[in-house]
Amino acid sequence: MEKMRFGLRKMTLLDFPGKVACTVFTCGCNFRCPFCHNASLVRGSEEDMELSAGELLSFLERRKKLLDGVAVTGGEPLLHPGTAELLEKIKSMGYAVKLDTNGSFPETLQKIISSGSVDYVAMDVKSSFECYEKLCGRPGMTEKVAQSIRILLEGKVDYEFRTTVVDELHTAADIEAAACVIAGAKRYFLQNFTESDDLLSPWSSFSGAGKEKLQEMLKLARIHVPSAELRGVDL
């Protein structure tokens, strides 16, 4: 962990449900989703990040009376062997800890949950499994993602699943198939794609889905996950 470096958003009311939190960013990702909004993090290196591990922990020590939680995101945090230790240290400081992950490291996820060093896990479900490897840009990921889904569905940690809907890449059938895989999940959010200057594939023309399409997707998702909701979408 000592060699890791991090980005930091000092305060957020959005990244950790119900918490006044800060957001810690790790660099690098093993996926190459063309609609990723954090291309600079995906392509970045440790040298690009602003804080050392020591500096981050010092910041968190000073903010104990102001913050309730810490959201650790990326990139893909579990790509780094030191992330498990980082989460343990943050938890030992008295913070609630949220982890964002793409679900491709199920063994590490299981160990972190078993250790009690994370309170909430937000996992991306990119699409139907039929389309998964095309969207994430990496072969051999589907079974790992399925394993992580099964781990979260056990309910040993609070969690959510979420799908970013891209009009050109997702059909209503894709969303229903994704919801079927996480059937009975505690929470499932559909969040509409929005334009960004930091897309992984800036030459691609992507857009969010229209209201009717989103409503149809939500209707189909609720067949399998009755609690499914739209997040950040004004209908």
Image (spheres, rainbow, N blue to C red):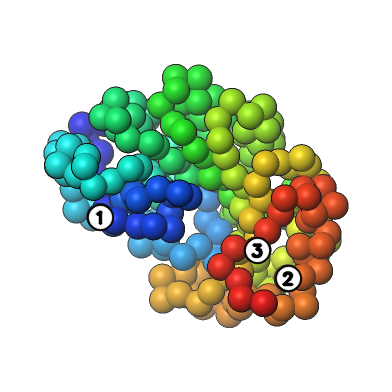
Specify the amino acid type for callout 1: Lys
Q: Are marks 2 and 3 in contact (CB under 8 Å)?
A: yes
| Residue under the image location 62 percent in, 33 percent down | 152
Residue 33 position in % (x across, y down): 55, 59
Q: Is residue 115 above or below residue 193?
A: above
SS for dot 3? strand
| Residue under the image location 52 percent in, 39 percent down | 121
Specify the amino acid type for callout 2: Leu
Residue 72 position in % (x across, y down): 38, 44
Disc 2 packing (10 Å; few <14; some 14–19; many ≥20): many
Residue under circle 2? 214
Compare residues 190 and 83 and report the one nearer the observer: 190
| Residue under the image location 42 percent in, 61 percent down | 38
Compare residues 187 and 3 and report the one nearer the observer: 187
SS for dot 2? helix
Residue under circle 1? 10
The numbered mark at residue 230 is: 3
Give me the C-alpha separation between circle 3 and circle 1. 26 Å
Specify the amino acid type for callout 3: Leu
Q: Earlier in the sequence, mark 2 or mark 1?
A: 1
